[in-house]
Amino acid sequence: MIRTIWLSVATAVLGGAVSQAVDAQGRPDAPITFFVTSEPIGDGGNLGGLAGADAHCQNLAAAVGEGGRTWRAYLSTQARPGQPAINARDRIGEGPWYSSVNRIDRPLIKSEIHGDTLLEAQRGSNMFKIYTLTEKGEIINGIGDPLPLQHDMLTGSQADGTAFPPDVDRTCNNWTSNAEGAAQVGHSDRVGHGNTSWNSAHATDGCSQDDLASWGGAGMFYCFAVD
């Protein structure tokens, strides 16, 4: 009888430990740590700088109960006099990250999504349409979906997640312009324009809200939890 009781207690304890371990590995009841903004700031490439973009990520996360984490926008800025460049990949922590679906699948690994090694570059990132969901768990309209097409994600980044040289604007004047300049964007569905990059597919023709929309975007971007 005593042996039976101890076995029951041990089973309960181990079961709880297994449950906690499963949660920590990112199963369905784990929090999300990556999403695409469900709505733009709405002023073209003028996001209020990196601080404004980060605040947008934080506010959207808070609206779905994920405001307890620190969120950062995946955006690079270019060097300016007295200001060094900032790389998007250096802003987002170390991961791994989970969206509302890949909590039960392969997580996003920093080196893999940037193809840091030859093997990772050959394997390819798992940053695909099914994973690049909004904070609400919604799919972003991509190629072949009903209009409007909105797969262009602002990044200002090269494929390895670093900033462009300062000679050509790819960040709408470091995310403060809704007129002059251009923005480098990635494709959340990794389709279109002959480039399958999630973070560096092409540049826009301008920085106004209309300019961003004309290329298949709306001024949305990726958000990562850094803690």
Image (cartoon, grey):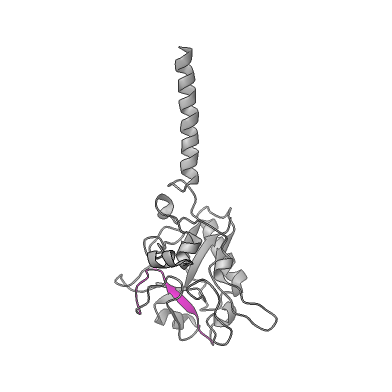
> Residue at the spot x=56%, y=78% of the render?
46
Q: Judge left or right: residue 167 versus residue 192.
A: right
| Residue at far left of view | 144
Front residue of this view, candidates 93 and 135: 93
Q: Judge left or right: residue 208 versus residue 102.
A: right
Residue 212 in magenta stretch: no
Number of marks in picture? 0
170 relative to 145, above or below: below
201 relative to 130, above or below: below
Residue 194 falls in image quadrant = bottom left
Q: Is residue 184 visible?
A: yes
Residue 183 in magenta stretch: yes
Q: Is residue 176 visible?
A: no
Front residue of this view, candidates 219 and 28: 28
Front residue of this view, candidates 88 and 141: 88
Image quarter hosting the C terminus: bottom right
Q: Main secondary structure of the magenta part?
A: loop
The magenta span reads 180-193
Residue 160 position, x and y percent, is 50, 71
Image quarter hosting the N terminus: top left
Residue 226 position, x and y percent, is 57, 58
| Residue at far front of view | 118
197 relative to 128, above or below: below
Residue 211 falls in image quadrant = bottom left
Residue 7 position, x and y percent, is 46, 21
| Residue at far right of view | 82
> Residue at the spot x=46%, y=37% of the render?
19
